[in-house]
Amino acid sequence: MGFLVDLRAAFHMVHEDSAPECRNWEESIGNDPMTRHQNLERARQMAKEIPFGGTQGHTQSPDHMAVRAQDIDWSSFHVVVSIDISIPLSIRLAHPKVLWVYFPADPGTPTAKLARRIPPEGFDVSLTHTHRRFSIRPGLGNRSIECPYSFQSSFTWDQIWPASPQREGVMVEHQTFALLTDEQRRCLRKFGPVRCPHGSLSEVATMLRTSKYYLRLDGGPLTGNGQVEAIMAGCLALGNPSTFVQRSLFTPQTVAVDFETALQKISFFESNPTDLETARKEQLVVAEFVCFRRPAYQLLCHLHQHHGSS
């Protein structure tokens, strides 16, 4: 959202090109020969279907809205961020003045991992999906930018979804929600509605805008995009850092290693609204710097360097 709202980027959907490098997204499907062909066919078929069967407000399929990459005037852009390798190499090489940025949809693929050191051929910069407070990582190249998939700011949210005048309750991350006991959910309801993300994007956004807290305690390690979105939406994000791959957005006041600690912290903040607002703003400052301002600035620096050398 940050590209579209804060940086006012144009958005184009392109058809899958026949160039071999544009099949790079297939790495995400997996290498099981028993299911690979079926999964690839299903993925391509989904592009021709209206998302959610039209129940969430969609009226057209992605394929219907897409255009050929060759039909876009790429010379009109200073920077192009490509999700996976959507633009064939021939086009990228034909527009050397454009800063071509590779942003993998799946950071766990072989190409995405290699891109942390060197961007794929024809790209100038890679975005890593990571958001470390100190952007030091073994093997991270000088053409890589630590940038989360949820690249956004609080301004992004303010422009799209209005803030609720009355916040209450807790948005519980879905893995944590599934592991809560009935008694634990009852305890959380003392502070207002207990929500679990579900439904359309707008419905989840509304839940975040009306919640006061975001909670993540248990489950497999997450990258933390949900935490980023909750903080930018105005929640105080509490949780157990050990359940996150990226832990940079935790402040001392927001660490809760178990349910009892989380309950105590929420109780304290409910009784001390000034401390709550202070903690929320401190966490937001860290999140906006790490997840938006720094990567945006570094992208601008790469653009200036690129124009100086082209």
Image (cartoon, helix red, strand yellow):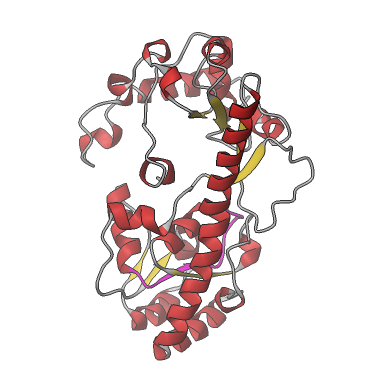
Residue 208 on image: x %, y %:
35, 62
Residue 1 on image: x %, y %:
40, 45
Residue 35 on image: x %, y %:
54, 23
- Choose top left, top right, bottom left or bottom right for residue 249: bottom right
Majority secondary structure of magenta residues: loop
Say which of 64 and 152 sits in front.
152
* Residue in the picture at 55% in, 68% down: 217
- Magenta highlight on residue 138: no
Which quadrant is home to the C terminus? top right
Q: Can you name the residue that lies furthest to the bottom here?
A: 271
* Residue in the picture at 36% in, 24% down: 47
Q: Is residue 95 above or below residue 199?
A: above
For residue 35, say whether it is visible. no
* Residue in the picture at 71% in, 30% down: 118
Q: Is residue 193 above or below residue 2?
A: below
For residue 94, say whether it is visible. yes
Residue 156 on image: x %, y %:
37, 52
Part of the protein shown in magenta: 211-222
Say which of 183 and 175 sits in front.
175
